[in-house]
Amino acid sequence: KNFPPGPRPIPIFGNLLELNLENPLADLERLAKRYGNVYSIFIGPRPAVVINGLQALKEALVNKAADFSGRPQDQMVNHAVQVKADAPGVILAGYNPAWREQRRFGLMTLRNFGLGKQSMEERILGEIERILKILEQSIGTSITDPLKSLMFHNAASNIICQVLFAKRFDYDDEFMKFFVSLFHETSKIINGRWGLIYDSIPMVRNLPLPFQKAFKMFKISHERRMEMLAENKKSRVPGKPRHFIDSYLDEMDKRGDDGSSFSEDQLCAFLLDLHFAGTDTTANTLLAAFLYLMNYPHVQERCQQEIDKVLDGKDQVSFEDRHMMPYVQAVIHESQRMANTVPLSVFHCTTKDTELMGYSIPRGTTIIPNLTSVLYEEGQWKSAHEFNPENFLDEKGEFVKPEAFMPFSTGPRMCLGEGLARMELFLILVTLLRRFKFIWPEDAGEPDFTPVYGTTQTPKPYSMKVQLR
Ligand code: HEM
């Protein structure tokens, strides 16, 4: 009763047949025009409420955070990723004290291993050296597909691996190749056609359909992480943490049997969460940023002028320099807005019977925070649908961040890695733009900015020409 309105569901499929399962974003926008900013759809028999626009999203995720910060359980992603029900990691954990305890530990440990300090910058700058080498080898020729070479994925993976394992891998190392393809491929399956079919129709779950690949890959990934954990335990000195694993094991020692949520299973799940969330997101955002920079050459040049001026006489950039680079900051934020890397956030769920914008929503309802609807919301941006750095500049040319900028979502479940991601995006983009000019090849035709849909979106394959400046 008083449940948000929406299209009428049919048995078994719910509203699935009304959505383009390849990419449902345009359908979700169409439904918002018809039913308003809070409406319902059925994913198979399961009701979900889609929340659109800044006002409704803030009302739910911030003002009513305790009611809207759960995570749906029993979906494909839970079945594929979770090895044990009592060790859900952080991303998929319910809104409860165990999640809070793990999240707090994660944030603290990221800080201890250098976030906000010089050491994280050094790790990132060290990794950038490898990207520079790859690009130097490509000068004058076209890189047919920067995605295929996976340079941004490999770099992002290595940056987080240094925190997790104090280790970086060669770009053709088997461990690296396996995990990068795990993240990239499964992020397209989970919210995509096959994930939705799995969630809607339980009787197909054992059939040999494409989602089985995700199950298989996650299973192998668990074995690899267990091996990594065992190897690290052999060389560990308690009280002298070298990386996330050691810190976590120290925390377990400290807590003993106090009934807390710390366990080796939980550690394994947490490692996957941070590695996954820290790789595909940042890398896809970088791919989108270069797609726009090549196609808006005047924007690229203006960034380069600002970078040259601020870094004059300096060997390398530091994260502090961002305060002197309002235009570059605006371009990075605008690239993130247009990249729309996590278009529907990670799904939430209601933790109790609640209300939103006058509608009643029962406990346990899946909540789809439509971040896309805010990132492109008319009335929130100077140019809602065009790539335009002016969206983040005031009349004096100072950098400003509108409230509707929420690619990391908002509220207590907001991205835990935002600080790291922002540091990576800034240092990588500035270093590469300082050294190279990126050119859209003459024979590349018209750019197609529509990304390939998934839990994380990726730009369509494109070519890139690189010249030394
Ligand atoms: C451009 C890069 C990134 C984007 C756009 C992004 C976006 C997001 C979004 C939209 C969520 C869901 C928030 C919600 O449920 O409301 C999320 C969650 C999360 N992200 Fe990120 N992320 C990025 C980078 C990272 C990095 C580098 C890390 C790891 C260090 C990370 C770790 C996490 C974790 C652990 C969560 C789950 C938080 C929780 O459930 O409490 N992310 N991210």
Image: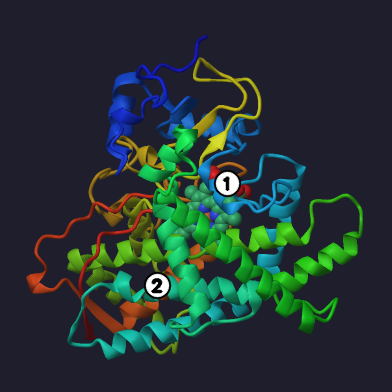
Q: Is residue 396 visible?
A: no
For the C terminus, the quadrant is bottom left
**Amino acid type of disc 1?**
His
Please state the horizontal and vertical placement of residue 133, each as a whole percent of the image. 36, 89
Q: Which circle's residue, 1 or 2, is located before the other in the chain?
A: 1
Element at badge 1? helix
Q: Residue at x 42, y 49 (%)?
A: 208
Q: Position of residue 377 (x, y in %)?
A: 33, 37
Taking 111 as reference, is 355 above or below it?
above
The residue wearing badge 1 is: 79
Quadrant for residue 273, please give it: bottom right
| Residue drawn at the location 28% of the way across and 53% of the way down | 451
User: Measured from the top left, where is residue 159 in percent x and y?
Assistant: 53, 74
**Nearer the observer, disc 1 or disc 2?**
1
State the residue in front, 382 or 122. Answer: 122
Q: Please give the name of the residue rendered at 33% of the width and 61% of the height, measured from the top-left corner.
A: 331
**Residue pictured at 35% horizontal, 76% vertical:** 307
Q: Is residue 309 found left or right of 170 in the rendered image?
A: left
* Amino acid type at image mark 2: Phe
